[in-house]
Image (spheres, rainbow, N blue to C red):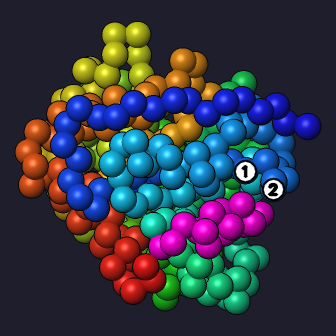
Amino acid sequence: MTARVAAPAVSAPRHAVPAGACDAHGHVFDARFPNGPSPYPLPLADLAAHAAMRATLGLARGVLVQPAPYGRDPACLLDALARSGGALRGVMSADADVTDAELESWHAAGVRGLRFVEMRAPGGGGRYPGSIGVEALHALAPRMRALGWSAHLWAAAAQLRDLLPDLVALRLPLVVDHLGMPAGPDDPDAGVLAGHLRHDDVWVKLTPCRLRAPEGYDRLRPLHDRLVAANPDRLLWGSDWPYVRMEPAPDAGAMLDLALGWLGDAALARRVLVDNPARLFGFDDGKE
């Protein structure tokens, strides 16, 4: 049985959070649902805990991303969407064998994208167990386009450098996780991502928590600002709560404060936290 650990506590942000703000990258782990192999203990972070986190942060909406331990089993994520009262959208995991009927039922439930992972699991041995690589995206792209879905990419900056030129030809929104996972603030491949961001189909989540270093997050400020300058209408903010494989775990309130402080401007914060996710994930499409 997979070990369970407490979800990290959160504090209220000091900055004013715009009304209707959205956490565009979070996870739910519910012990009622079976999971596959996991390289990390699963946090006790069910829908109620996730809702409490959002309430503390002043976030009206959220996007749940399918965690690798649930693999292709949609039950946990779909249950959370069904009980969210329209406050949540989902990003699922699926390969080319998924049926049209499944995709359509997921769309009706609030799913608005699929996630594809190229990051390698700690200790080597390939991708995280349960994850699906971008080879499936090429097969699924026509059906995703028909549904108006986005493709979410977790990959290192060097991998994205090689992948994005081909993927933009698929003509669907490509959402890059975690600032594109550069090797460091001076990684030249991070500059390549900023160039791609000028393409209307490329989006980036301003989620720096996976790039934490002993000296803190300030080293990432130039990269953050470069992405904002490139195309603020294609940026999202996500907490990544409940921070699996991170010890000590960040405080989601502090991460939101960091984002609001770096954005600096109330109108820009509204674009990134409210307008952009509403448009990409269809929060105003009548499902609420």
CA separation, marks 1 and 2?
Answer: 6 Å
Residue at the farthest top position: 214
Quick check: 57 left or right of 79? Answer: left
Q: State which quarter of the image contains the C terminus.
A: bottom left
Q: Position of residue 67 (x, y in %)?
A: 65, 50
Looking at the image, residue 4 lies above or below residue 284: above
Q: Which residue is mark 1?
A: 30
Q: Mark 2: give few (<14), some (14-19) or many (20+) Cα within 10 Å.
A: few
Q: Is 48 in front, or is 207?
A: 48
Q: Label 1 is placed on what type of residue?
A: Asp
Please tell me which residue is depicted at 69% across the width and 39% down the height of the picture.
Answer: 44
Q: Is residue 262 above or below residue 72?
A: above
For the record, the magenta segment spans: 73-86
Which quarter shows the N terminus? top right
* Residue 74, x across and y down, in percent: 72, 66
Q: Going by the image, does 88 lie left or right of 106?
A: left
